């Protein structure tokens, strides 16, 4: 038998004799034996999937994105899902599968993405980006950890349950998106259209990293994101600085003065209303952060900077990254940039600005107050043009939620150590979409490492994390079945209307 990714057959000798079912709880030895016996196969599957150059940002490779979606669907069928199909969107396809064989039981939706970032710059790759290459216990290739490897962890775990037990302990739906790396422009429309099909009790996302090697972690907060583009227009064309200097306002100077008003000397954002809705981190949260093995001096050295002194003074570095918002200048241009001197007053200057948001902040409100602030500080003599975008809310999940506690137990069983709870300064748009549109709790249970070079040359997935992640997900479904069964009535698990 060949799987979706063109690999050798399944070893049928893994199923342990005498596995005993007691209610929903079944001896997990057989499923763990299965995944351990099939590690080589999973590695070959992931290497084969990496050969799909599913770069969503490149229109010339959109056929590869579709090929990748079809490969995921085929792998879902190999795993034993009842229904698996490619669902169309207004953009690139989504792979969908489900197993709904437990009427009345809880339903979990697993989200991941199969598109990848461009491989540029190719010259910096040690091995070809779309040929999975193993070196020193790590698999190198574009998409290895972001997010193909982490999606495959779930498919392998689902297969283990179905092959050793003949069923899952709860209902499962799997959505693997094809546009996450370009901002998921069609995902919210898809969610709204497919509400019935996607009805569930909790969403599980494995597109995050742990805090460090040998520090299992669950992410309980993600920051949101909004952005602005600011153009300052002066004269109709560049002017001779000797003739017009001192007469015409210089757009670069005007823009620089405006940007300088955005932050206080203390590092706090100086925009009125920017912090509306935010709560202060609790003493317990700060204590948890302080207990993590984080070396600011070593991190600064790794980044080739003197100090980690950005943002609000007097706060822990990880507090600033995870629990506080930020307003950043992402790019600025204007005037002459070529070799030598060109003595002009430029006709325009331009800047890109973004904000990472935390729980309690309203993206629409933040966009408005920053725009109003910039308008209020623009000097006379120039014309201001501002565009803004983004409405991604921050997402925060209680570490006391039954699904999060179930995930913590699964991760402890999979990695042999209780996980810590962490935040992340980044943003995953679909996580916010699930929160805002479907109002669903989410479990963020990724196992990547901070040095996996996602989006960069030499992206990798440490095979210890990959195999530990598969075992964690194998335990996770049992843990979620028990936790959600006792925490409230499950949602109806019917399949929605066919697309």
Image (cartoon, rainbow, N blue to C red):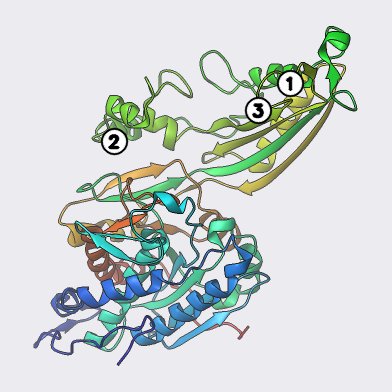
Which marked residue is nearer to the observer: mark 3 or mark 1?
1
Residue closest to the eye, 117 or 355: 117
Quarter occupied by the N terminus: bottom left
Please determine whether, in this image, residue 70 is positioned above or below residue 295. Answer: below
Q: Which mark is residue 484?
A: none
Q: Which residue position holds label 2?
A: 288
For the residue labelled by badge 3, is the local secondary structure a helix, a strand or a loop?
loop
Q: Residue furthest left?
A: 18
Where residue 39 sits, quadrant-wise, is bottom left
Between the residue at mark 3 and the residue at mark 1, the CA separation in whole angstroms equals 27 Å
* Residue 188 relative to residue 52: left or right: right
For the residue labelled by badge 1, is the local secondary structure a helix, a strand or a loop?
helix
Which tag, 3 or 1, sits closer to the chain's start?
A: 1
Which tag, 2 or 1, sits closer to the chain's start?
A: 1
Q: Which mark is residue 273?
A: 3
* Neighbours of disc 1 within 10 Å: few (<14), some (14-19), many (20+): many
Query: CB of mark 3 within 8 Å of CB of mark 1?
Result: no
The image shows residue 33 at horizontal and vertical percentages of 14, 77
The image shows residue 129 at horizontal and vertical percentages of 40, 61
């Amino acid at each position: 038998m060949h799987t979706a990714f063109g690999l050798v057959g399944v070893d049928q000798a893994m199923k342990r004799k005498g596995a005993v079912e007691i209610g929903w709880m079944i001896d997990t030895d057989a499923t763990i034996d299965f995944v351990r016996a099939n590690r080589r196969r999973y590695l070959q599957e992931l290497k084969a999937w990496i050969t799909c150059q599913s770069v969503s940002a490149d229109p010339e490779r959109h056929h590869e994105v579709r090929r990748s979606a079809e490969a995921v669907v085929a792998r879902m069928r190999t795993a034993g899902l009842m229904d698996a199909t490619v669902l169309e969107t207004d953009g690139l396809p989504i792979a969908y599968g489900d197993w709904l064989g437990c009427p009345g039981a809880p339903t979990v939706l697993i989200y991941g993405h199969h598109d990848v970032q461009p491989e540029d710059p190719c010259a910096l790759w040690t091995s070809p980006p779309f040929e999975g290459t193993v070196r020193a216990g790590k698999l190198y290739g574009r998409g290895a950890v972001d997010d193909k490897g982490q999606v495959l962890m779930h498919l392998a775990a689902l297969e283990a349950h179905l092959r050793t037990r003949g069923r899952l302990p709860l209902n499962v739906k799997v959505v693997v998106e094809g546009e996450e790396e370009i901002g998921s422009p069609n995902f919210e429309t898809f969610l709204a259209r497919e509400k019935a099909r996607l009805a569930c009790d909790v969403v599980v996302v494995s597109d995050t990293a742990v805090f460090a090697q040998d520090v299992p972690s669950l992410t309980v907060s993600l920051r949101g994101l909004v952005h602005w583009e600011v153009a300052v227009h002066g004269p109709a064309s560049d002017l001779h600085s000797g003739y017009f200097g001192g007469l015409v306002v210089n757009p670069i100077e005007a823009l620089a003065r405006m940007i300088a008003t955005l932050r206080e000397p203390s590092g706090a954002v100086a925009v009125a209303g920017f912090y509306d809705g935010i709560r202060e981190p609790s003493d317990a949260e700060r204590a948890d952060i302080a207990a993590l093995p984080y070396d600011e001096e070593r991190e600064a050295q790794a980044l080739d900077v003197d100090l980690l002194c950005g943002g609000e003074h007097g706060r822990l570095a990880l507090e600033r990254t995870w629990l506080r918002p930020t307003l950043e200048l992402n790019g600025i241009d204007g005037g002459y940039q070529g070799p030598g001197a060109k003595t002009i007053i430029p006709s325009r200057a331009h800047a890109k600005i973004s904000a990472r948001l935390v729980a309690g902040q309203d993206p629409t409100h933040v966009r408005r107050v920053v725009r109003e602030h910039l308008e209020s500080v623009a000097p006379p003599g120039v014309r201001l043009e501002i565009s803004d975008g983004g409405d991604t809310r921050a997402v925060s999940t209680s570490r006391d939620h039954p699904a999060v506690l179930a995930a913590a137990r699964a991760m402890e069983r999979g990695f042999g150590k209780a996980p810590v709870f962490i935040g992340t300064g980044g943003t995953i748009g679909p996580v916010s979409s699930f929160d805002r549109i479907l109002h669903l709790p989410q479990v963020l249970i990724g196992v990547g490492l901070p040095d996996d070079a996602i989006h960069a040359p030499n992206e990798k997935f440490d095979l210890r994390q990959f195999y530990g992640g598969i075992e964690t997900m194998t335990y996770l479904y049992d843990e979620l079945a028990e936790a959600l069964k006792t925490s409230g009535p499950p949602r109806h698990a019917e399949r929605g209307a066919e697309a």
